[in-house]
Image (cartoon, grey):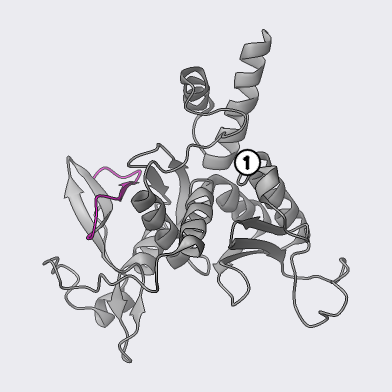
Amino acid sequence: MSRRNDNRHRVATICRRATGLAHETCMQWAAEGLITRSRPVPDAGTPEQQAFEARLLAALGGGAVLGLTGIRPSPAEPVVSLDPVRAHEVIDAVWPRLDGTGAVHGVPGLRLVRDDGAWWFTDAADQARVRLEHPSPGWRPRPSPIRRQEDRSWRDHRPGRYPVERPGAYGPASRDRDRLLSRIFRRLGLITKAGAEHGWVSLSTTGTYDLVIDCCCASGAVKLMDGLRRSALVDREEDDSGYPGDVDLGEASLAVRHASCGSFPEPVDLPRLRWATC
């Protein structure tokens, strides 16, 4: 094998593991220059697309992210593959709705749109969108019985029916967060594999981190962090975090943890915090 083909194979392997795409597709992308050793998974093409993908990932808290089995992370209009059994969890998690106190849940401004024979998550405020791929040709996105009770106007897609406000000011910290979470969204294969192999994986946010990924065990957390780093989630010079399970991108931060931290020493002077342990 020539050195060029060997490099393409390595890049394609990283892309395949991160996204769940077929190796042949990743090899073609490597040959076309869409992926490289420094960027083995394509970034979103616009800030708006990054922001929309970041909001989708943030809404997939708990175990809802396991309703996705992979992603085709093209620069524009990526495609996410839905698990045939758990697809409703994805819809329920991202669907914008108001609770009894008036608080907004899900992704503000999200719409479900039928276009060219496919279903799309779209942003009401701009052109960002993500296509949904389900193994059943006749599949239609429907809410669970609980969501149907919470929102009886599920089929009412009139503009303005659901909240579209964006929380907070859009400054450098927000752009860093969007870029980091969008990149993680485009590496869904690593997260879903960790959940499938090791029992469960869960997403959450804290006052310290923009995203925390909890795995059920240390081996799952180690494999996930290794995959994120190998896929160049951030450039080495960008990541100045002080803990092995932390990733920093500008002012945005990610932590990968596991359920039991007993086998790993915690930072001195911070005995009560469950820091990243992989």
Question: Does any portion of residue 200 appear in the rendered image?
Answer: no
Side of 47 relative to 41 (left or right): left
Question: Which residue is at 72% across, 65% downward?
Answer: 258
- Residue ID for mark 1: 232
Residue that lies at the very extreme toward the top in this rendered image: 2
Task: Where is residue 158? Give x, y as percent.
Answer: 11, 67
Rendered position, 146 above or below 26: below
Question: Which residue is at 72% across, 46% downward?
Answer: 226
**Is the N terminus in the top left, top right, bottom left or bottom right quadrant?**
top right
- Residue type at tag 1: Ala
Task: Where is residue 20? Give x, y as percent.
Answer: 52, 39
Q: Which residues lie in the magenta part? A: 124-138
Question: Which residue is at 28% across, 72% downward?
Answer: 165
Secondary element type, mark 1: loop
Question: Does any portion of residue 222 appear in the rendered image?
Answer: yes
As for residue 192 lying within the magenta part, the answer is no
Task: Where is residue 112? Give x, y as percent.
Answer: 23, 58
Magenta part, dominant SS: loop
Instruction: Place residue 167 in its image quadrant.
Output: bottom left
As for residue 134 lying within the magenta part, the answer is yes
Residue that lies at the very extreme toward the left in this rendered image: 158
Instruction: Place residue 277 in its image quadrant.
Output: bottom right
